[in-house]
Amino acid sequence: MIVYNLRCSSSHDFEGWFRNSEAFDTQANEGKLVCPVCGTTDVAKAPMAPSVAGTKRTATPAPQQLRQMRQFMTGLRKYVQENADYVGPNFPEEARKIHYGETEERQIYGEASLKDAKELLEEGIDVAPLPPDLDEAN
Ligand SMILES: [Zn+2]
């Protein structure tokens, strides 16, 4: 499983989880990569941030970065909740049914253990973690 930093045509940065680089190419070619902020399918891999060897950088993000991250995660969660069906603990089962064409194809979200998620990915079913609900947490 690999994680790519993605960026849409409006410069929204987000992460995409893929089984391998081919899965990324396939989804990109089929227009299945959607920006969680603005919904465009014009999404590409973001250029890697250059890393400079030997310089010490603090791991703590600046307050503005934290705020942006928070806005992004809240936006992503909202997008999923508005566009996907909540299936609760049936997530692994529903995801398989959709993958194998046993039920209507749609976006779903719900509960899955790390083990479930790993098994789904191994079967070729793309899953991604939903960010925590920060508004509720505070
Ligand atoms: Zn966007």
Image: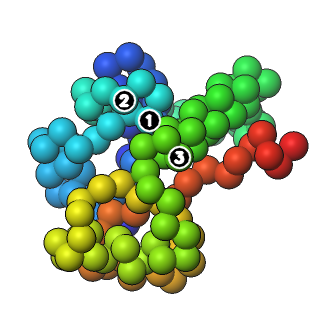
Dividing the image into 4 quarters, which one contains the C terminus? top right
Q: Is mark 3 within 8 Å of ligand 1?
A: no
Which amino acid, mark 1?
A: Pro
From the image, tell me which residue sits under label 1.
36
Give me the C-alpha separation between circle 3 and circle 1.
11 Å
Q: Residue at x 35, y 71 (%)?
A: 95
- At label 3, the amino acid type is Gln
Disc 2 crowd, CA 10 A, few/some/many (<14, 14-19, 20+): few
Q: Residue furthest right?
A: 138
Q: Quadrant of residue 88?
A: bottom right
Q: Position of residue 122 (x, y in %)?
A: 31, 78
- Secondary structure, mark 1, is loop
Amino acid at circle 2: Gly
Pointer 2: what residue?
Answer: 39
Res 81 label: 3
Where is 67 relative to 106, above or below?
A: above
Residue drawn at the location 28% of the way across and 76% of the way down: 97
What is the secondary structure assignment of the residue under circle 2? loop
- Ligand 1 within 8 angstroms of badge 1 C-beta: yes
Q: Nearer the viewer, residue 42 or 93?
A: 93
Verify CB contact (< 8 Å) between mark 2 and mark 3: no
Residue farthest along the top direction in this orientation: 10
Question: How far apart are the two marked residues, 1 and 2, measured between alpha carbons?
Answer: 6 Å
Place of residue 75 in the rendered image (x, y in percent of width and height, measured from the top left): 57, 33
